[in-house]
Image (cartoon, rainbow, N blue to C red):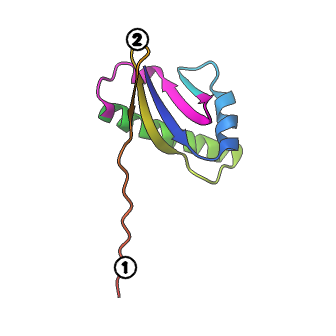
Amino acid sequence: MWRVQILGDSTDLDLLKRSFIDSDMKIKHEDGNYYVEASKFENLSAVEEVVKMANEHIAILSGIARLAYNARIPFMLGHVLHINCEKSKRDYLPCRMRITIWSR
C-alpha cells in the first residue's frame, strides 16, 4: 500500500478529508500528518510513478479546496510511504529544490 503525505493548511485538509469518505481516494489524518490513499496507487511499483501520480492528484485537490473552501495555500507533496503486507514501512522523501537567481 502506498500513502502520500499531503502538506497544507490543516483546516482545509480536514474539510477535504470529510469530502472523500466514500471514494477511491481517501485522506487520512494520523500522527499529526495528512495522507492520501488512492486505489490508483496500488498498481504502481516504483516510487517515481507514485510521486508523479500523487502530484497530479494533489494539484486537483488544491483546485477543489480553492473552489469549495476558498483555500489560499496550495497543497504540496510531503513524503511517500510504502507499507508492505508484513506491515513494514519504507519512507521516501522526494527531493525538492528551490533556486533563486538575482540579476544586477
Q: Residue type at mark 2? A: Glu
- Determine which residue is flagged by label 1: 102
18 and 89: which is toward the camera: 89
- Of all residues, the one furthest to the top in this rendering is 85
Which mark is in front, 1 or 2? Answer: 2
The residue positioned 50% from the left and 40% from the top of the image is: 58
Q: Quadrant of the C terminus?
A: bottom left
What kind of element bears circle 1?
loop
- Determine which residue is flagged by label 2: 86
Q: Which span of residues is magenta-colored?
A: 28-47
The residue positioned 35% from the left and 74% from the top of the image is: 101
What kind of element bears circle 2?
loop
In this rendering, position of residue 15 left or right of residue 86 = right
Q: Residues within 10 Å of mark 2 (few under 14, many from 20)?
A: few
**In the depicted structure, whether residue 103 falls above or below residue 34:** below
The residue positioned 40% from the left and 11% from the top of the image is: 85
Q: Which is nearer the N-term, disc 1 or disc 2?
A: 2
Q: Quadrant of residue 49?
A: top left
Q: Magenta stretch containing residue 38, yes or no?
A: yes
Question: How many callouts does the rendering have?
Answer: 2
Q: Give the image location of residue 41, x and y in percent.
A: 40, 24
Q: Residues within 10 Å of mark 1 (few under 14, many from 20)?
A: few
Q: Magenta stretch containing residue 4, yes or no?
A: no
Q: Quadrant of residue 48?
A: top left
**In the depicted structure, whether residue 83 falls above or below residue 48:** above
The residue positioned 64% from the left and 22% from the top of the image is: 21
In this rendering, position of residue 80 left or right of residue 70 = left
Q: Quadrant of the N terminus?
A: top left
Q: Give the image location of residue 5, x and y in percent.
A: 50, 36
Q: Residue type at mark 1? A: Trp
7 and 54: which is toward the camera: 7
